[in-house]
Image (cartoon, grey):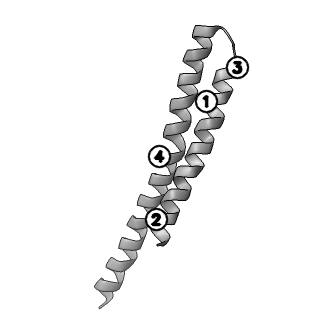
Amino acid sequence: MEKLKKLKEQSKLSYGILIGSSIAFLILMPTVFLLLVGMGIDAYTHKSPLFTLSGAIVGFLSSFYNIYRLLKRLTQ
């Protein structure tokens, strides 16, 4: 009986780690990708921080939208 309880606790921990790493991935990837795209456009157009900041802001907003979708799906 105690083994079953310990297994359930480990399962909850694994699930929590999976959700946490998914959220970290959802924050990091769009933000970094759009930041790099913005830096590339800035280098091409010689408009220093304009597209870099725009890419970072859009990436950050899309990250939060993706997290919202994930949490909505998990709570259903």
In the rendered structure, which disc, 3 or 1, sits on the residue that comes first in sequence? 3
In the rendered structure, which disc, 2 or 3, sits on the residue that comes first in sequence? 3
Residue 73 screen position, x and y as percent: 46, 65
Name the front one of labels 2 and 3. Answer: 2
What amino acid type should be assigned to the residue bearing mark 2? Arg
Check if mark 2's residue and mark 1's residue have beta carbons within 8 Å.
no
What amino acid type should be assigned to the residue bearing mark 3? Pro
Q: Which residue is mark 3?
A: 49
Q: Which residue is mark 2?
A: 73
| Residue 55, numbered label | 1
Residue 36 screen position, x and y as percent: 54, 24
Residue 52 screen position, x and y as percent: 64, 24
In the rendered structure, which disc, 3 or 4, sits on the residue that comes first in sequence? 4
Name the residue nearer the viewer: 32 or 44: 44
Quote the CA–CA distance across marks 3 and 1. Answer: 10 Å
Check if mark 4's residue and mark 2's residue have beta carbons within 8 Å.
no
Residue 66 screen position, x and y as percent: 52, 51
Name the front one of labels 4 and 1. Answer: 1
What amino acid type should be assigned to the residue bearing mark 1? Gly
Q: Residue at x 57, y 9 (%)?
A: 44
